[in-house]
Image (cartoon, coloured by chain):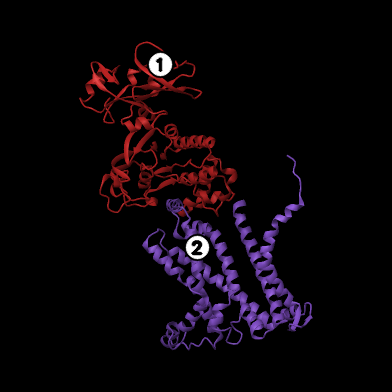
Chain colours: A red, B purple
Amino acid sequence: MALIVFENIAHSYLRSPERMEDYALRPMNLTWRHGGAYALLGPSGSGKTTLLNIISGLLRPTAGRVLFDGRDVTDASTVQRNIAQVFQFPVIYDTMTVFDNLAFPLRNRGVAAAEVRSRVVEVAEMLELTKNLQRRASGLAADEKQKVSLGRGLVRSDVSAILFDEPLTVVDPNLKWRLRRKLKEIHKRYSVTLIYVTHDQAEALTFADRVVVMHEGSVLQQGSPQELFERPTDRFVGYFIGSPGMNFLPCRLSGDGAEVAGQFVPLAAALRTKAPQATGLEIGIRPEAIGLSGSGSGLAVEIGDVEHLGTRKIATCRLGVHEIKVVVPPEQPIASERGVLNFNPAMTRLYADGRLVG
Amino acid sequence: MQKWQDERAWFLVIPVVLLVAFNALIPLMTVVNYSVQDIFDPTHRMFVGTEWFREMLLNTRLQNALVRQFVFSAMVLLIELPLGVAIALTMPRRSGWGLSAVLVIVALPLLIPWNVIGTIWVIFLRPDVGLLGHFIDHTLGIHFDYPTLPMQAWISVMMMEVWHWTPLVVLLAYAGLRSIPDAYYQAASIDAASRWAVFWYIQLPKMRGVLTIAVLLRFMDSFLIYTEPFVLTGGGPGDTTTFLSIYLVKLAVGEFDVGKAAAFSIIYFLIVLLFSYVFYQVLLRAQRGVVVR
């Protein structure tokens, strides 16, 4: 159990990094609260795994310090940091039984046999591995193996944090859901810090109470799933989170609203006053926060493709050169060619040069 | 859909049968032919049945060569496998200049023609001008004369064999080590595993497949060894380093006992076949055991 703090951490895999692009992880300050369930979310190559390996101590950062409860552990080994980590592909010791696999980290630390036994039995019970305890681990299915990997992290009652590096990649979709629930259960029961790397937003948003969105080696936003959805602080976050992502429309302030492709969109006064008198302004609006109707006042658009997804429909509308995705309830009829859009003012955001204004 | 049988399908295997016949069966049959006849000259020959076989099986020189051969192969396996694995473990894990250099140096003995290997060692072991021979004889002060001392002849042949073939085991073991994902080592360090535990629970099990191949190859090759000891010791002193092949050639070429040599060849062939099969089955079962249990 520990409060983990990153102080000006940066990392490059090159020997002598010069430009910002040479860094896999750009200078950052981050705090991981004790007992939090974090998801590290970002596309492939955004530095998630690098960040994880710096926490666990498998990687020494090029610059900055890592603090555990105020203690500098930048040079401490993984064992000294007392971290558990579960990897993308299950790591099991082929020649050992499931029991011995689970007992391995404890035995290596010189824990007494009776204590080892009770810990292993408890963890196996929770992970539903009890009936396989005496089997060779190499004969198990991929998801069972991954549970064994996970179990090796859980048997140590005093770990500072458990790190997951896309651990459900090899697992069947329906089992994924069960294992994810298991993780939540574990989190509740042991209130241990969990840090979970994924590129799957559904996984991140259901698992975590704090989501850290990464892109090109930087942390763009850290917040609850709801914050990320409602107030993405960066254009990338808006686009990356949500399916489909946020719509962005270049605009110009005019009167008590904004002008988009020659048409008028009303904006809240608070938003307008915050906006800098600059170019590069964009309106950001979630597809779920747009109303589509056949006629009336609003933004007149052409309606293109409509996707039917069962629980909802996604209409692709055209406004001049811009494309706007709109989520429509399944029962609502959609006119074939022209329609009118209305933006929910409470959910309309303004961005300047890709950053949230308000 | 109804399936129907057509025996004519057997004709499809004719090309393979012909190929195997010409490159294996027919040559082998000439040996069988010799092994059951006593041939004086091309016009005078006599069918002798199993006489050559009986004679060879009761031949004490052959029996001694066979025992010698097993001892030799067993020692080869016992020395080369642990040594090869040990060397592979010390090699750099990451690609780069250093690794390339090490690989070339390690593989060098495998690239040298076998009779040249024998010649190299003949010179290397000479007490007057050979580096090692001179070192043992003059610097260590041990009287070194392998052509006349059986123990020294054996040690010399073993050293040459180990020098020549351990690299193969090193390369196989190294290939096995390289295929282990980094996550295993990372997980082991997180689990606070000792260096020994990493070897015993991760590296050795992951090398099992390649080491199986190494055992098979080294057993078969060492069981058939001829060229290098023939050049180094010629099978001497006396018969002390006469392995099966060397004895076979002595019989066939030296004494021109073609009938006996042919019978012996067939026995030899069957022994190799039998042992390779047994080895393979045992190792296969061991491997399957891991998966099933």
| Disc 1 residue type (three-letter) | Arg
In the image, is residue A10 above or below residue B194? above
| Disc 2 residue type (three-letter) | Ala
Residue at the (71%, 71%) spot, across then down: B29
Chain letter behind tag 2: B
Residue A59 in sight from this viewpoint = yes
Residue at the (40%, 29%) spot, across then down: A242
Residue at the (29%, 43%) spot, across then down: A26
Foreground label between 1 and 2: 1
> Label 1's element?
strand
Q: Is residue A97 left or right of residue A294?
A: right
| Disc 1 target residue | A338
> Label 2's element?
helix
Q: Residues within 10 Å of mark 2 (few under 14, many from 20)?
A: many
* Same chain, labels 1 and 2: no
**Which residue occupies the foreground of this view, B146 or A189?**
B146
Q: Residue furthest top?
A: A296
Please identify the quadrant where the N terminus of chain B is shown.
top right
